[in-house]
């Protein structure tokens, strides 16, 4: 297998977001909630500070979806699954609803979309993906994603002007 040589380690981390037995009320897919990051910043380049470690800054995070959301109907009857985006400011945006035949799978396009957390104050949540199903314990969902600091923060800084 070929080896890839890098100057620095990756800033991202792969995620398998799995939510078995979806309920009939909207619930956040576990780990599908954009994070923020505490990063070393002894020069105080960033204005948002980590309240627990003053030498560190807080920067926004992002979850980037790599695949569609896969929704599997485990029952012997037709079911539906509904997906919404709950933004960090509390706005609800419909993403999609799919009717799934018995023992079949439906896909809701999430790939290429991001969940963001731009407001770094605690304990605020970032954007979240939530799902609900037509019946309890009959739908499992899964999606692959990448979690990282928001791309505008990677390798970029605002110099402190004296």
Image: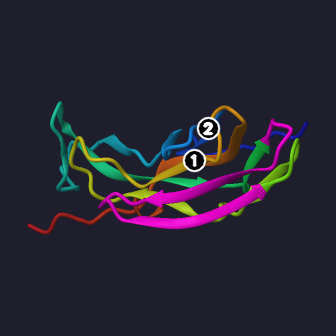
In this view of the protein, which residue sits in the foreground, 99 or 87?
A: 99
Measuring 36% from the left and 65% from the top, which residue is drawn there?
91
Q: Is residue 141 left or right of residue 48?
A: right
x and y percentages locating residue 88 in the rendered image: 34, 57
- Majority secondary structure of the magenta segment? strand
- Secondary structure, mark 2, is loop
**Left or right: where 87 falls relative to 11:** left
Magenta region, residue range: 73-99
Residue 22: mark = 2
Closer to the camera in the image, 94 or 6: 94
Residue at 79% over, 42% down:
73
Residue 123 visible to the viewer: yes
Q: Is 152 left, or right, of 40 in this rendering?
A: right
Mark pair 2, 1: CA separation: 6 Å
The percent coordinates of residue 70 (x first, y second) are 75, 49
Q: Is residue 40 left or right of residue 160?
A: right
Task: Check residue 116 for magenta coloring.
Answer: no
Q: On the rendered image, what quadrant is the C terminus found in?
A: bottom left
Residue furthest left as drawn: 162
Toward the viewer: 110 or 54? 110
Tags 2 and 1 touching, CB below 8 Å: yes
Figure disc tally? 2
Magenta residue check for 91: yes
**Would you name the residue on which mark 1 appears?**
132
Colouring used for the render: rainbow
Quick one: label 2, few (<14), some, or many (20+) residues within 10 Å? many
């Amino acid at each position: 297998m070929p080896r890839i040589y890098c100057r620095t380690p990756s800033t991202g981390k792969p995620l398998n977001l799995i939510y078995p037995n979806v309920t009939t009320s909207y619930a956040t897919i576990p780990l599908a909630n954009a994070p923020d990051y505490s990063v070393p910043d002894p020069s105080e380049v960033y204005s948002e500070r980590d309240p627990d470690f003053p030498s560190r800054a807080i920067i926004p995070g992002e979850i980037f979806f790599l695949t569609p959301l896969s929704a599997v109907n485990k029952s012997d009857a037709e079911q539906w699954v509904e997906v919404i985006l709950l933004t960090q400011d509390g706005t609800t945006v419909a993403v999609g609803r799919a009717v799934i035949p018995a023992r079949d799978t439906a896909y809701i396009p999430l790939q290429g979309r991001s969940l963001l957390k731009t407001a770094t104050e605690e304990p605020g949540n970032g954007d979240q993906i939530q799902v609900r199903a037509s019946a309890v314990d009959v739908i499992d969902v899964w999606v692959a994603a990448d979690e990282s600091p928001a791309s505008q923060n990677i390798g970029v800084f605002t110099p402190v002007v004296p």
